[in-house]
């Protein structure tokens, strides 16, 4: 059976009124990166002005790619109180963003019912970006 060569994932929460410290307190976990709307960050060229607030938690890369492992890792690190997630999903955009790199053309992504339930119970959208070997030719 073909498999995904490798993958990475991040839990992303975004919104104009988002305060990363408040999200960290609610979820009991510090983000990999976080910023408030309007925050100015230095860059090699022109400074970057953040257009919205964000809180992001990255998962370790998986080889072979494994959506279930990403979800287990990320949600093993945060508060899983569904009332807290209901508050967050009512106020902010929440997404589990995954990038998959295919080893060959017939690879596929699969998620267990348990993984889908974790995301659904928390009203988290699943975003997938899949790169095939043909993408390397461009």
Image (cartoon, rainbow, N blue to C red):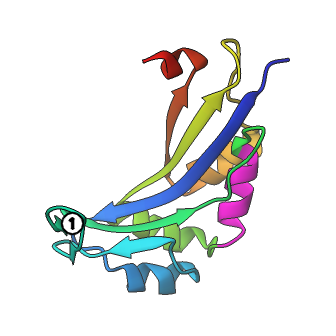
- Residue ranking furthest to the front: 44
Secondary structure of the residue carrying tag 1 is loop
Classify residue 137 as left or right of residue 106: left
> x%, y% of residue 88?
42, 68
Which residue is more in the foreground, 36 or 18? 36
> x%, y% of residue 60?
68, 58
Q: Quadrant of residue 106?
A: top right
Magenta-span inclusion, residue 19: no
> x%, y% of residue 72?
74, 57
Q: Residue at x 44, y 71 (%)?
A: 33
Quarter of the picture holding the N terminus? top right
> x%, y% of residue 58?
57, 61
Question: Is 132 situated above or below 90?
Answer: above
Image: magenta residue range: 68-77
Classify residue 133 as left or right of residue 63: left
User: For the image shown, how many numbered marks are present on the structure?
Assistant: 1
Q: Residue at x 53, y 80 (%)?
A: 30
Q: Quadrant of residue 93?
A: bottom left
Mark 1: few, some, or many residues within 10 Å (few <14, many ≥20)? some
Quarter of the picture holding the C terminus? top left
Question: Is 123 situated above or below 92?
Answer: above
Classify residue 97 as left or right of residue 60: left
Mostly what secondary structure, the magenta segment? Answer: helix
* Residue holding disc 1: 50
Q: Residue at x 24, y 74 (%)?
A: 41
Q: Residue at x 26, y 76 (%)?
A: 36
Question: Is 97 situated above or below 129?
Answer: below
Which residue is more in the foreground, 42 or 109? 42
- Residue ranking furthest to the right: 1
């Amino acid at each position: 059976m073909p498999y995904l060569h490798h993958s990475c994932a991040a839990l992303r929460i975004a919104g104009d009124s988002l305060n990363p410290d408040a999200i960290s307190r609610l979820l009991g976990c510090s983000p990999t990166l976080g910023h408030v709307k309007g925050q100015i960050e230095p860059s090699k060229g022109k400074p970057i002005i953040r257009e919205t607030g964000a809180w992001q938690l990255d998962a370790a890369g998986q080889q072979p790619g494994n959506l279930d492992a990403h979800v287990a890792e990320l949600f093993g690190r945060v508060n899983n109180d569904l009332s807290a997630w209901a508050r967050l999903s009512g106020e902010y955009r929440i997404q589990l963003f995954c990038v998959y790199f295919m080893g060959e053309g017939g690879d596929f992504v699969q998620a267990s019912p348990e993984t889908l339930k974790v995301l659904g119970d928390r009203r988290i959208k699943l975003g997938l970006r899949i790169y095939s070997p043909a993408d390397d030719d461009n």
